[in-house]
Image (tube, grey):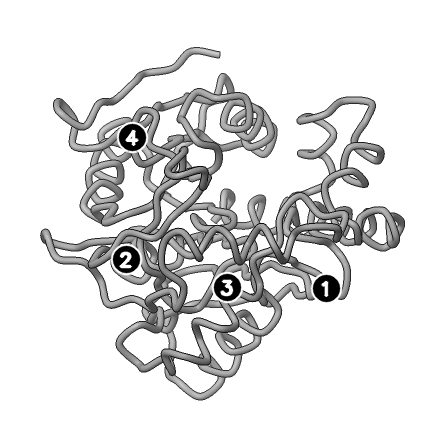
Amino acid sequence: MKKISFEVEESGFYGAYWENKNKSNSALIAMLGDDPSDYLAKTCVKWLHKNGVNVMTMSPAKKDYGHHNYPLERIEKAIEVLKKYGNTKIGIVGASTTGMLALVAASYFSDITLTVAMTPSDFVWQGFMQGNKDGCKEWPIEGESTLSWHGKPLDYMPFVYKHPDYWKVIEQETKGTGNMLCSRKLFDDSEKAYNLTEKEMIKVENICGKLCLIGADDDTLWNTGKYIRRMDERLKKTPHKCDYEVLVYKYGTHFVFPETLIKLLVPGFSKFVMKFIFKSAKEHADECRQTRIDIDLKLRKVMREWNNM
């Protein structure tokens, strides 16, 4: 696949543009993977190309695997570039932390007319870093949000646990569960301690076009089902600009990716690999797979309809 790379210093954002060999005037900003050219990002590009769109992969920065004060202006710059390449329809897709980022970006920029948020929260978090610090793989950054706008951190929910307790709580919850990672306690305890206000909530009512909110109740990282249902209630009570779809499943784990994407990621071993990542994927393998199949069918339909508008 041919790509055009973009650096923050020259272009205002870190990313890569992957033009579909089949001509298209639609493009998705894909915030998937730790780097615009890593294995996950490139596999997502292949999947999205199969669905008829051009792709701009993006991530915070080279070898920066955290999310702290990420400037929303970078999404704005990427939108400008996509328009220069002839894209008249622009969407965004994110998963996990970037599911939240995708929602915030779409609420700021009306040029985004398709938003796919997998396992998102409905509020902005405190910024965090990943790597190795005092034996911890992740830690919160004091005074920083996950996102910023015009040089100022967005209002955020602070984590109740500081470094190094932040990581110790995650480790303790994960230990012996059979899951790759558990951090629900971190989020639940932080929300109880902080008492979220309107300032931290994502203004999903400002999102334009089509919005897809996707998650599962057996998510061990945070309470995705609760967050999506809160967004559903918010949209029911608030005048909004989008046509939205809520896809919340009982089983599906944190990896609510389309089944055909999972098969591209781990060809021939998808059903086995998922079982080793999350306990629910092992105990409810058929239900989790059916969730991914359903997401696959619905997402491809949504993308096809948006692309043909």
**Residue furthest front as drawn:** 134
Residue 3 tag number: none
* Residue at horizontal 36 percent and vertical 78 percent from the top: 194
Image location of residue 264, percent across then percent down = 69, 26
Q: Mark 2: which amino acid?
A: Ser
User: In the rendered structure, which amino acid carries the disc numbered 1?
Assistant: Tyr
Q: Which residue is mark 2?
A: 110
Residue in view at x 56 percent, y 46 percent: 303
Of badges 1 and 4, the one in the foreground is: 4
Q: How far apart are the two marked residues, 1 and 4, measured between alpha carbons? A: 33 Å
Closer to the observer: label 3 or label 4? 3
Q: Which residue is mark 1?
A: 249
Q: Amino acid at mark 4?
A: Ala
First in sequence: mark 3 vs mark 1: 3
**Residue in view at x 52 percent, y 22 percent:** 42
Q: Of helix, strand and loop, which one carries label 3?
A: helix
Q: Amino acid at mark 3?
A: Leu
Q: Gap in Å between the C-alphas at discs 3 and 1?
A: 22 Å
Using the image as rendered, state which of residue 100 and residue 242 is in the foreground.
100
Please give left or right for residue 223 compared with residue 128 in the image: right
